[in-house]
């Protein structure tokens, strides 16, 4: 969709809401914008400039900075021509807001650009929250009405070929920088269109960053690097917002450059640095409810693509069976994530997800598949102070009767809190040496003798 088409479509945002259904919520009216009429007139001027071809050439070149400068020039010229006198501060604010609406994502554009914000939550037009350093904060950002929020959502999903309307009121998408986006609209969302953006750093985090954040220690990083190089199958587990994808991305960076990697995701987020990477992304059904391509379809297809490693962004249902089958049939070194509250819960969830594949398998057979396929579970949690830390590195050791056996290699020990309420602690070895140490040695990998010594 061109800039002109977007601008013409967004003019409807300025019209008041009408035809509300009985029993809908009462929304507090936003504070009147003293420059609203001026913005509408400038908006029309920008459309005229595009029609005359002045901006079209700049847009065609695809340079955002040049486009911002061109729009800023139009605003300055219009204010001079009409003799509008406003303070320098108000003028800059006006220009910023018009640029955000024209080529950005409206009122939340400045939140998206703020590197200190890790998550943005739009709960209808009047309630916008952000997460900073693990804490939820309400912002002063407001939208004009529900239609205004809808236009921003459509601007995000349209370039990706996704749609959102009453027949398909939920959507997963991503921003150009890879940040994850989820949107849900009425009639499912009773407070108006809701938008959640999980931001990712413009520069992918490295293992050094996670060590600096105290998410892991140098010893844990060294151990995980050895496990990846030795082609162990690893599952990263954790709750929502615990940092699983970030950790998976860092662990994936340990994969050697001479291997072929297939990544499979619902919304592409992983940012692997290796050259030989094939990225696959699911596809939602079309307007007729057909044509959907699921993670399970992509996992099965990836087996025919001669992968050295398969990295699945997250297993949620029946694709867990296909993933386990791949791990058990020569695709060692595969990586994935899953939602769980602990390493033991991750195993229970995997059982449930395998059953969701529709295969009538006995529980013992499923557990044997899990025990033989997975070597290591890395569990991550978001603690009460908002920090994200690896709390368990757990080895799957086999089966005893009908029970999968496991042992913790590293665990997080909390020692207390500092004067600011931040949790003090670190992940330390338990003193147990993993059974796959011989496999590491066979791969030519030697770890320091004291890395597993309890401290």
Image: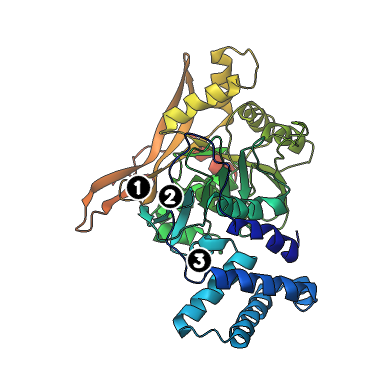
Q: Distance between the residues labelled 2 and 1?
A: 8 Å
Secondary structure of the residue carrying numbered label 2:
helix
Q: Do the residues labelled 2 and 3 touch (CB within 8 Å)?
A: no
Q: Earlier in the sequence, mark 1 or mark 3?
A: 3
Q: Mark 1 points at which residue?
A: 427
Q: Do the residues labelled 1 and 3 touch (CB within 8 Å)?
A: no
The image quadrant of residue 39 is bottom right
Front: mark 1 or 3:
3
Q: Name the residue under label 3.
A: 110
Front: mark 2 or 3:
3
Q: Mark 2 points at which residue?
A: 220
Q: Where's residue 164, x and y in %?
A: 65, 43
User: Which residue is found at the position 65% from the left and 55% from the top?
Assistant: 155
Residue furthest to the left in view is 419
Q: Distance between the residues labelled 2 and 3?
A: 36 Å
Q: Distance between the residues labelled 1 and 3?
A: 36 Å
Q: Is residue 434 visible?
A: no
Q: Which of 288 and 348 is in front in this view?
A: 288
Q: Where's residue 353, x and y in %?
A: 57, 25
Q: Is residue 455 above or below residue 45?
A: above
Q: Which of 390 and 439 is in front in this view?
A: 390
Q: Nearer the viewer, residue 278 or 193?
A: 193
Q: Is residue 36 visible?
A: yes
Secondary structure of the residue carrying numbered label 3:
helix
Side (left or right) of 218 relative to 416: right
């Amino acid at each position: 969709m061109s800039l002109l088409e977007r601008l013409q479509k967004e003019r409807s945002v300025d019209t008041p809401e009408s035809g509300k259904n009985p029993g809908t919520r009462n929304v507090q009216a936003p504070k009147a914008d003293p420059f609203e009429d001026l913005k509408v007139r400038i908006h029309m001027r920008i459309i005229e400039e595009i029609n005359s071809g002045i901006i079209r050439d700049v847009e065609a070149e695809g340079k955002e900075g040049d486009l911002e400068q061109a729009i800023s020039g139009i605003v300055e010229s219009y204010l001079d021509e009409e003799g509008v006198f406003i303070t320098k501060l108000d003028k800059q604010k006006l220009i910023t807001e018009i640029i955000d609406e024209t080529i950005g994502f409206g009122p939340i554009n400045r939140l998206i650009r703020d590197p200190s914000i890790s998550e943005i939550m739009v709960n209808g037009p009047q309630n916008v929250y952000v997460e900073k350093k693990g804490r939820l904060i309400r912002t002063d950002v407001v939208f004009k009405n529900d239609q205004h929020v809808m236009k921003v959502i459509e601007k995000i999903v349209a370039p990706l070929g996704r749609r959102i309307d009453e027949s398909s009121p939920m959507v997963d998408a991503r921003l150009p920088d890879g940040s994850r986006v989820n949107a849900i609209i009425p009639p499912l969302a009773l407070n108006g269109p809701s938008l959640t953006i999980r931001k990712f750093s413009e520069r992918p985090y490295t293992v050094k960053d996670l060590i600096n954040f105290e998410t892991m220690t140098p010893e844990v990083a060294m151990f995980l690097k050895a496990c990846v190089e030795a082609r162990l199958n690893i599952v990263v587990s954790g709750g929502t917002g615990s940092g699983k994808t970030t950790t998976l991305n860092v662990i994936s960076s340990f994969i050697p450059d001479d291997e072929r990697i297939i990544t499979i995701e619902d919304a592409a987020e992983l940012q692997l640095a290796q050259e030989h990477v094939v990225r696959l992304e699911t596809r939602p059904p079309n307007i007729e409810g057909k044509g959907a391509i699921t993670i399970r379809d992509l996992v099965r297809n990836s087996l025919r693509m001669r992968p050295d490693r398969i990295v699945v962004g997250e297993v949620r249902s029946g694709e867990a069976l296909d993933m386990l089958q791949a791990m058990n049939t020569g695709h060692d070194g595969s990586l994935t994530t899953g939602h769980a509250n602990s390493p033991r819960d991750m195993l229970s969830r995997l059982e449930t997800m395998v059953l969701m594949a529709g295969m009538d398998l006995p529980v013992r057979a499923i557990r044997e598949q899990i025990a033989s396929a997975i070597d290591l579970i890395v569990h991550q949690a978001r603690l009460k102070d908002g920090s994200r830390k690896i709390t368990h590195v757990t080895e799957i050791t086999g089966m005893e009767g009908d029970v999968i056996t496991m042992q913790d290699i590293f665990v997080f020990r909390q020692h207390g809190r500092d004067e600011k309420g931040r949790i003090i602690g670190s992940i330390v070895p338990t003193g147990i040496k993993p059974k796959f140490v011989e496999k590491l040695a066979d791969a030519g990998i030697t770890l320091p003798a004291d890395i597993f010594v309890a401290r």
